[in-house]
Image (tube, rainbow, N blue to C red):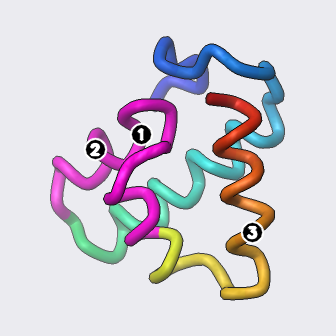
Amino acid sequence: GSLFDPSCTGVFDRQLLRRLGRVCDDCFNVFREPNVATECRSNCYNNPVFRQCMAYVVPAHLHNEHREAVQMVG
């Protein structure tokens, strides 16, 4: 997918965006549902699908870090 999400209007941080995108990619690899990939990135990762994906593919101790990243890039 594209790194430059038009719904992300906050801080442009390539590393953060790549990390958040990877959550969606990993999640898609687990569930294999096309809508997961698109939904996960909607509203600049600030959505229920991203949070669900995070719960599955991100270790719990990194959740806050990811949530802060979402706040920053959104």
What residue is drawn where x is 70% and y is 59%?
Answer: 66
Tell me the amino acid under the disc marked 3: Asn
What amino acid is found at the position of numbered circle 2 in the picture?
Glu
How many other residues sit within 10 Å of disc 1, few (<14), some (14-19) or many (≥20)?
many
On whether residue 8 falls in the magenta region, the answer is no
Q: Considering the image in quadrants, where does the N terminus appear?
A: top left
Secondary structure of the residue carrying tag 3 is: helix
Secondary structure state at the residue bearing disc 1: helix
Image location of residue 57, percent across then percent down: 53, 78
Mark sitting on residue 41: 1
Marks 2 and 3, Cα distance to the nearest angstrom?
21 Å
Mark number, residue 64: 3
Q: Is residue 52 magenta?
A: yes
Along the viewing direction, whichever of 18 and 45 lies nearer the viewer: 45
Q: Is residue 17 left or right of residue 40?
A: right
Residue pointed to by mark 2: 39
Q: Which residues are magenta?
A: 33-53
The residue depicted at 77 percent of the width and 42 percent of the height is 16
Which of label 3 and label 1 is nearer to you? Answer: 3
User: Mark 2: which secondary structure?
Assistant: helix
